[in-house]
Image (cartoon, helix red, strand yellow):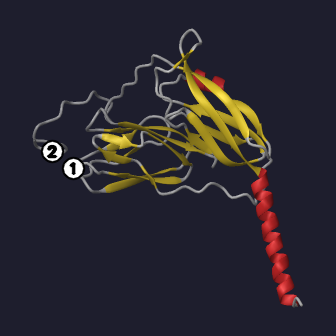
Amino acid sequence: MLTAKTNLHLRWLSAVLACTAFCCAQAATVTARVAWEDGAGKVTHAHETENIVFWLTLVEGGVPASLPAKTSPRLRLVQKNKSFEPHVLVVPVGSLVEFPNRDPFFHNVFSLFEGKRFDLGLYEAGTTRDVRFDKPGVSYIFCNIHPEMSAVVIAVQTPYYATSDARGEITIRNVPAGRYTLRVWYEAALAETLNSMTREITVSEENLALGVLRLARTNVVQSHKNKYGRDYDPPAPDSPAYPHP
């Protein structure tokens, strides 16, 4: 015989399971694949298909407040072997990103271009500094000592984003049903090219496959100055920023 307390517990458990089932039913997986095309409009495999960024921004209205937002792990852009790892990092607006120095010499991370502007100054091996990316945008990251170092941080106002893998595949999971604006970013793309790829999509309770999205490769040569707006100086042999042989 069920007691009143047991009956109340069972009703509570049923409500939790029903809510969980509802949330799962309302969330879909959005997939796509990217491919490069040459000047003649033909698909080419001459370029890497990693680090193509997709994100979905909700068109006004449509997402139940009970659905959880995407949570981010600890975010780091590691300096190692005179490079940033990863090269492209997507973060929600408001995220704190750490910049640990794992090289045996000094670095000076800075960004004075689009997105978040900052200068972390000179800091030694084994130390770290951090930056909060408090507004949406694309931040181009460099080192004031090593001109070969570059990275990109993209801050987005949505939990629904993904970066393509080595096969050019993109997967955005747990997207609630609704209407979204799809935006794409890839390095060296012209602004008008990226704008032309922006479009509205509708996500239902079914998984959504967007198919193959063709990207136009540009011949833009990317170069940058140091944080003072000047060309980089050649490394000084006695500089503490470099290890001695």
Side of 61 relative to 189 (left or right):
right
- Which residue does the numbered mark 2 point to in the structure image? 243
Residue 89 position within the rendered picture, expressed as x and y whole percent measured from the top left: 48, 43
Q: Residue at x 54, y 10 (%)?
A: 39
Q: Residues within 10 Å of mark 1 (few under 14, many from 20)?
A: some
Locate the N terminus and report the quarter of the image it occupies.
Answer: bottom right
**Element type at marker 1?**
loop
Residue 23 position within the rendered picture, expressed as x and y whole percent measured from the top left: 77, 58
Residue type, label 1: Pro
Residue type, label 2: Pro
- Contact between labelled residues 2 and 1, with CB atoms less than 8 Å apart: yes
Q: Residue at x 30, y 45 (%)?
A: 80
Quick check: can you spot residue 198? no
- Which residue does the numbered mark 1 point to in the structure image? 104
Side of 61 relative to 188 (left or right):
right
Side of 175 relative to 25 (left or right):
left
Quick check: can you spot residue 143? yes
Rendered image quadrant of residue 172: top right
**Element type at marker 2?**
loop
